[in-house]
Every structure is written in C-alpha cells, then in structure tokens.
Image: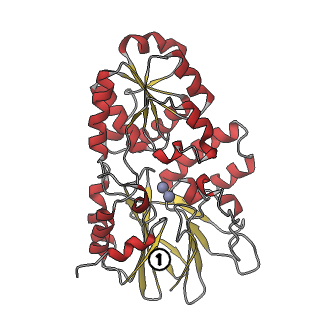
C-alpha cells in the first residue's frame, strides 16, 4: 500500500490523498478546493497525473468523505472516465445546493450533470475498487452524512478520518463504530483543524442549543447566520426555537434541504416538517406577533428580510475567521453582520482530546496529519497500548 498526500499536509482543506495498491489500483480520497483564505498565498492549481490529466493510467475511483467544498470542490476537474463515489445522503444534499446555484447561473449546467452521475455508498456496505476494500464509517461533523474511510489492501489497513468531531449530537457513536468496524490499523490519516484554531474549551452542540434557547427567550426577533447544510446546528436551532416559543422560519432552499432530511431521518431530533414555517409575505404578521428564529446566509434575500426587522438580534453561528477583514473573499458577509452580533458557535472538528481518543481506539503504527495548520501538535500524542 502506497500513500501519497497530493495536498493538505500543511493547510486546512483542499485535501487530496492517493492510495495505490501493489497491483497498481489507484484511488483518491477527496478532491478538495482550497479554502478562499488560501487564495492569497500561492494558489497552485491541483494537477495530478491520471487524475486531472491523462498523462498516466487513470485513477480507478475518487471517494468523497463529505460534501464540504474543501473535500469535493474540484469534482469538475477530474478526468471524465473516473467514477466519483459519495455517501447517498451527501449526494442529495449537495445536489439541492448545486441545483440552486445552477438556477442562479452561478455554476454551469454541465457541472450539475457530473453531480447527477456521482455513484453512492451507504453504511454498512463496503466498496470494492479492484483489490482495494473501503469501509465507510458515518461520523459526526458540521456536514451531515460525513464519513471516515477504512482502506484495506496488500495486507495493510488504514483509516482516513475525513472531517469529524465527538462533541456533536452523534459524536457518542463514533468510538463504538471504530471499535466495531475498524479495530487496530497500520496507519491513520487524521484531520487536525482545531489545533491552530480553537483556544477555548469545546462547547457541545447540546450546550449550544441551551444557550440558543435562552437567547431566543430573551429576544423576540432572531436572525442566525449559519450554513444551510450544517444539519446538526439547524436541528439545535429548531429545538431551541420551539422551546423558546418562537416560530422557526426558513427560506425556500433551506426548507428543501430540511424536507429532504426529514424524509430520511430516523430520529425525531432531525424531523423538521411541521416544526418550521416557510417564509412568505403571509407569515409576516405571525412572525411579528410570536417572534421568530430565522437561519440566514450571505445573500440579497437575507439582507432584505433583515431590513424588515431592524430591531432584531443577530446571532453569528459560524467560524469567526470569516469575519477577519484580511479575508477579502468574505467582504459582503462582513458588511452584512452588524457589529453587535452575539457569537454562538462550536467547531465541526475534533479537539485534541477527541483525536487522542481515536488514536487510543485504533492504535495506529503511523499517524499522518492532514487538514491542519499545526501538524506538529500530533507529535505530542502518545498512544497507551
Ligand atoms: Zn474540511
Ligand atoms: Zn468538512
């Protein structure tokens, strides 16, 4: 088993990992776009022989861990003959978003056609690409249906964590799943996003929900800036909103995503139908009377609604880095967020303690850090055997 990290050893996002078997099977795990904050540094176009150009035998497959752009964003640069695999739920969520972008002429129709052709995987089914066996393990992350991937070939076992955390609502199931489906491995490729970012103790998603409930009780009109695909955050906001007696109001795209989640969710926590109101002029008087919580994003529609309720509270529920004026790519967002916002967020990524727990569970001989600006912190991990 040969491992080549084409990109991602000293940066957050934009990761591309190649696994090659002795017989010559080649797969890529994730084909991420660099995050905008990195554009100012040298933004070298990803070019991998056999993956983005045909100067070598093409890869046999690309496996995407989850739908965040820094893991899937370069899907349209991959050679057409290479099949792209993604979790079945991830594909649907990604398609809803990209359809709305295609409708707004932000992405071309041909890109949407590629997405429709994505092949899917679903736990607990394994995926076999020639002599490489892949076992997906669903994990907790700020993207729904995110996966770690166990890779087996040439008598060796590797675990690629993708992006994950243990402090969300589904975090408790991650370690037992690793015990059941992974066991000991030869190599761990592990994300380390929070090692340079987070200085505060980690808030659980449930603690965040309780804080949100208090904010919504204290304030009648609430706009929450958060990602429309961060399903765990939206479920927490929905619950907090209902308990605080406010209407939970969503725009059309958000409603489409939540309706889809509702159709596949097994737990009540992820049931949204009947618990949110779709925004329209008809519900404005209800919103005014009962008060509301509305997730919003960086677009003109959100801007217009915010202006209709100037006395609202604005809750910022995303990574604070986006508000750093040095990141010019987020200028319109920075202009949208009022100065007196309430910050209410917890990371979608594992803290050091959680990374150590994963290491102690699967006892890797070798650890390769990716998706991190401080990979050297991994040297402090000592695995008790
Ligand atoms: Zn990522
Ligand atoms: Zn992610």
- Percent position (x, y) of residue 102? 69, 41
Q: Is residue 69 left or right of residue 65?
A: right
Quarter of the figure with residue 160: bottom left
Front one among 230 and 98: 230
- Determine whether the residue tagged by mark 1 lies in a helix, strand or loop: strand
CB at disc 1 and ligand 2 closer than 8 Å: no
- Percent position (x, y) of residue 154? 47, 88
Note whether 230 is above or below 194 in the view shown: above
Quarter of the figure with residue 318: top left
- Percent position (x, y) of residue 103? 69, 37
Note whether 153 is above or below 375 in the view shown: below
Residue 119 seen anywhere in this rendered image of the structure:
no
- Percent position (x, y) of residue 273? 40, 30
Front one among 199 and 83: 199
Q: Residue at x 60, y 42 (%)?
A: 330
The C terminus is located in which quarter? bottom left
Q: Residue at x 51, y 34 (%)?
A: 254
Front one among 17 and 304: 304
Q: Which residue is mark 1?
A: 133
Note whether 385 is above or below 110 in the view shown: below
């Amino acid at each position: 088993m040969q491992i080549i990290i084409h990109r991602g050893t000293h940066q957050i996002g934009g990761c591309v990992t190649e696994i090659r078997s002795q017989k010559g099977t080649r797969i890529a795990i994730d084909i991420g776009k660099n995050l905008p904050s990195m554009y100012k540094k040298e933004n070298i176009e990803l070019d991998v022989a056999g993956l983005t150009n045909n100067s070598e035998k093409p890869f046999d497959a690309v496996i995407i861990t989850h739908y965040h752009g820094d893991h899937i964003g370069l899907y349209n640069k991959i050679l057409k003959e290479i099949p792209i695999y993604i979790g079945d739920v991830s594909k649907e969520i990604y398609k809803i978003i990209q359809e709305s972008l295609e409708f707004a002429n932000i992405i071309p129709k041909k890109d949407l056609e590629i997405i429709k052709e994505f092949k899917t995987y679903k736990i607990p089914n394994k995926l076999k690409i020639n002599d490489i066996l892949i076992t997906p393990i669903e994990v907790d992350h700020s993207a729904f249906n995110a996966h770690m991937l166990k890779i087996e070939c040439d008598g060796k076992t590797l675990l690629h964590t993708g992006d994950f955390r243990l402090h969300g609502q589904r975090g408790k199931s991650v370690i037992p799943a690793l015990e059941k489906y992974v066991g000991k491995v030869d190599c761990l490729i592990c994300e380390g996003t929070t090692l340079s970012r987070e200085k505060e103790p980690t808030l659980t998603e449930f603690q965040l929900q309780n804080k949100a409930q208090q904010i919504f009780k204290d304030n009648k009109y609430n706009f929450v800036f958060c990602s429309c695909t961060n399903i765990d955050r939206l479920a927490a906001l929905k619950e907090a909103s209902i308990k605080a007696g406010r209407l939970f109001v969503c725009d059309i795209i958000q409603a489409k995503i939540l309706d889809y989640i509702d159709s596949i969710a097994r737990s009540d926590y992820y049931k949204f139908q009947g618990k949110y109101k779709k925004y329209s002029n008809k519900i404005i008087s209800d919103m005014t009377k009962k008060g509301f919580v509305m997730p919003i994003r960086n677009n003109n529609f959100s801007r217009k609604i915010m202006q209709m309720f100037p006395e609202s509270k604005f809750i910022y529920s995303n990574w604070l880095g986006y508000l750093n004026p040095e990141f010019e790519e987020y200028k319109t967002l920075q202009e949208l967020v009022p100065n007196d916002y309430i910050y209410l967020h917890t990371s979608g990524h594992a803290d050091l303690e959680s990374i150590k727990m994963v290491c102690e569970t699967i006892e890797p001989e070798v650890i390769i850090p990716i998706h991190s600006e401080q990979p050297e912190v991994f040297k402090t991990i000592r695995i008790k055997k």
